[in-house]
């Protein structure tokens, strides 16, 4: 489905920028930070809208994306 494709694409993007925080120089850490903050805002939006619409927690958990700081 489209939701799964979107989730997998964001997970792939987070996996790619996760290694940027270890780069000492260059734009990679800054870009990674902004992508991570955007991802956190989208995660909060998904959770809040799902809670307002009374969606079950298992469906909410399936929609959540990876976090930038997750190992």
Image (cartoon, rainbow, N blue to C red):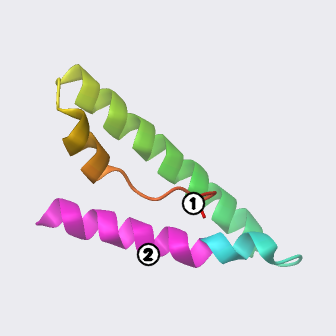
Kindly indicate the quadrant of the structure image that contains residue 65. Answer: bottom left
Q: Quadrant of residue 49?
A: top left
Numbered badge on residue 14: none
Q: Is residue 70 above or below residue 16?
A: above
Residue 7 drawn in magenta: yes
Kindly report the distance in space between the C-alpha atoms of the residues bearing marks 1 and 2.
Answer: 12 Å
Residue 33 at x, y percent in the picture: 68, 58
Give the image location of residue 68, x and y in percent: 59, 59
Disc 2 crowd rating (10 Å Cα; few below 14, some 14-19, many 20+) is some
Q: Work out which residue is located at the far right of the displayed protein and give it.
A: 24
Which numbered disc flags the more N-terminal residue, 1 or 2? Answer: 2
- Image coordinates of residue 23 in percent, x first then y, are 81, 78
- Which residue is the extreme one toward the left? 1
Could you say which is closer to the camera, residue 36 or residue 60? 60
* Quarter residue 31 falls in: bottom right
Task: Residue 18: give x, y in percent of width and height.
Answer: 63, 70
60, above or below 6, in the image: above
Residue 53 drawn in magenta: no
Identify residue for label 2.
Answer: 12
Write the start and end of the magenta stretch as one range: 1-17
The residue to which callout 1 is attached is 35
Q: Is residue 64 left or right of residue 67?
A: left
**In front: label 1 or label 2:** 2
State which quarter of the image contains the N terminus. Answer: bottom left
Tell me the residue at 52%/68% (across/down). 14
Q: Is residue 46 above or below residue 28?
A: above
Q: Quadrant of the C terminus?
A: bottom right
Residue under the image location 25 percent in, 35 percent down: 57
């Amino acid at each position: 489905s489209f939701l799964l494709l979107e989730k997998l694409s964001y997970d792939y993007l987070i996996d790619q920028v996760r290694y940027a925080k270890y780069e000492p120089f260059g734009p990679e850490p800054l870009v990674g930070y902004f992508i991570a903050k955007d991802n956190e805002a989208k995660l909060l939006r998904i959770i809040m809208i799902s809670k307002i619409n009374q969606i079950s927690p298992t469906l909410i958990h399936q929609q959540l994306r990876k976090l930038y700081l997750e190992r």
